[in-house]
Image: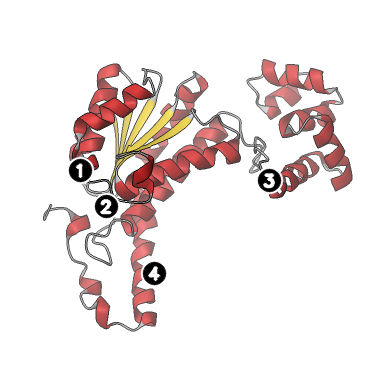
Amino acid sequence: MKHLTTETRNEATMHLDEMSIQQALKTMNQEDQRVSQAINTALPQIAKVIEVTTTQFKNGGRIIYIGAGTSGRLGVLDAAECVPTFNTDPGDVIGIIAGGSRAMTEAVEGAEDDEMLAQTNLKEIELNNKDVVIGISASGRTPFVKGGLYYAKHLGAHTVSIACNTNTEISESAEFPIEVAVGPEVLTGSTRLKAGTAQKLILNMISTLTMVGVGKVYDNLMIDVKATNQKLVDRSIRIIQDICDITYEQAQKLYETARSDVKVAVVMHLCDINREAAQERLKRNNNIVKQAIKDQ
């Protein structure tokens, strides 16, 4: 552990407890800026991962995050957010945390040290070779993650690792390793800070650009948004309004006629066809709106 940069002391914060709030905030902000710089060096590796997740997702595969502690919680969060943002099924992007749902709010003793536990969890969701398993570990040595990657590789699934140190054990276990060296934490060993931020940013990139690749985004609009509340209903209507260049009231009527399906509403208007014809055209074009519009 002493050789991990995420566990070493940060020279800039040796006297953190003696700093004024303003000094501490400035220092934390400066350290956080190092995160995006570190990620910049890993963009080629992240791009390769997104190519794989996009291809596998199109072919019926799933994206599965596995991790312990903060890393696991971030995976669960990203998976959960895909449902309302991109209208995915809960089983399309899955977050698995060592210790199960209880570990989201409290520490589960020994869970992250159990290599076999990850295999059990992956068996429970019937992992197969179409899936992509993404192991997340700040240290890069979490046994739970290593066990999960080993099992996934054994089944022929694609494997990805995300670590915040270099030359890590999980990198050796993954087909597509991502290493982002964020350096020592402001609070020694507290990897919920810079390491957690780096992991969150990378997961944002992977899930968002995968969904762009499978047609769940029109320009920069959430065209596949699942309207689970009034705010999202309003957003859905405004998306139709923007794309179709019509009034809010016209967009609202289209939304209702399309039975709350933004994609169907847009294709109905731009192609001047009814709901059934729009649905059929989308189906013919892999549910990608721009392709469906061109399919005259």
**Residue on which disc 3 sits:** 229
> Relative to residue 58, is residue 202 drawn left or right?
left
Frontmost residue, 147 versus 292: 147
> Relative to residue 179, is residue 143 drawn left or right?
left
Where residue 52 sits, quadrant-wise, is top left
Say above or below: 234 vs 287: below
- Secondary structure state at the residue bearing disc 3: loop
Frontmost residue, 295 versus 115: 115
**Residue on which disc 1 sits:** 110
**Residue on which disc 2 sits:** 181
Say whether disc 4 or disc 3 marks the residue closer to the N-terminus: 4
Within 10 angstroms of label 3, few (less than 14), some, or many (20 or more) residues?
Answer: few
Kind of residue at badge 2: Ala
**Residue on which disc 4 sits:** 29
Q: Is residue 68 visible?
A: yes
Say above or below: 283 vs 262: above
- Numbered disc in front, either 1 or 4: 1
Within 10 angstroms of label 1, few (less than 14), some, or many (20 or more) residues?
Answer: few
> Residue placed at 22% from the left, 56% from the top?
6
- Between the C-alphas of marks 1 and 4, the distance is 33 Å
- Between the C-alphas of marks 1 and 2, the distance is 26 Å
- Secondary structure state at the residue bearing disc 1: loop
Say whether disc 1 or disc 2 marks the residue closer to the N-terminus: 1
Within 10 angstroms of label 2, few (less than 14), some, or many (20 or more) residues?
Answer: many
- Between the C-alphas of marks 3 and 1, the distance is 39 Å
- Numbered disc in front, either 1 or 2: 1
Q: Is residue 179 visible?
A: no
Kind of residue at badge 1: Gly
- Between the C-alphas of marks 3 and 2, the distance is 39 Å
- Secondary structure state at the residue bearing disc 2: loop
